[in-house]
Image (tube, helix red, strand yellow):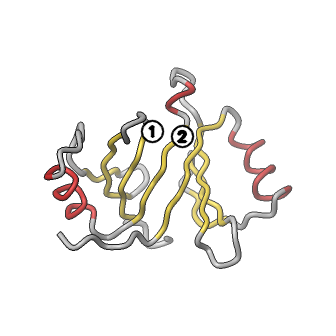
Amino acid sequence: MEKSIFEHMITFIYVSDLDKTKIFYEKVMGFPLRLDQGTCRIVETNQKGGGLLGYCARDQKSAPADNLIITLVTSSVDEWYDYLTCCGVDIPEPPKLNLNYNIYHFFFSDPDGYKLEIQEFRDPAW
């Protein structure tokens, strides 16, 4: 596979109070909203739109270690899955459509256990 460059990188954090976090990042910090997904919101952290932060309502059962996801956005999800699988990366599940967020994606971990996601937005609002 000729590796494509990712279109965006989003750092997702999970938060205990979505409304307080919305006020902080969108009002206090002034980050414009890029996409509202209901339980997740994605904001732009710079003027060119290259820096993106997503914050999502946390499931109270989730452990603090699960509160960070590095998301790489591409239209080549299947190609990346095939490539990473061929490289021996352990990927628990193949790419799938998530109807809640209208994305096509899969998860895996880096050598230190950080969660990574490769995804494509299917939402026309993106």
User: Spatial distance from mark 2 to mark 1, Cα to Cα?
Assistant: 8 Å
Residue 42: image location, x then y, percent: 60, 58
Depth check: 47 or 15 in front? 47
* Residue denoted by label 1: 114
Look at the picture and state if 92 lies above or below 84: above
- Mark nearer the viewer, 2 or 1: 1
How packed mark 1 is, by other alpha carbons closer than 10 Å (few <14, some 14-19, many 20 or more), is some
Residue 73: image location, x then y, percent: 41, 64
Look at the picture and state if 121 lies above or below 84: below
Q: Residue at x 25, y 50 (%)?
A: 96
Depth check: 22 or 108 in front? 108
Q: Are marks 2 and 1 in contact (CB under 8 Å)?
A: yes
Q: Residue at x 25, y 60 (%)?
A: 80
Residue 33: image location, x then y, percent: 67, 65
* Residue denoted by label 2: 68
How packed mark 2 is, by other alpha carbons closer than 10 Å (few <14, some 14-19, many 20 or more), is some
Q: Quadrant of the N terminus?
A: bottom left
Depth check: 28 or 123 in front? 28
Look at the picture and state if 109 lies above or below 63: below
Instruction: Name the residue type under label 2.
Output: Leu
Residue sitting farthest toward the bottom: 48
Q: Earlier in the sequence, mark 2 or mark 1?
A: 2
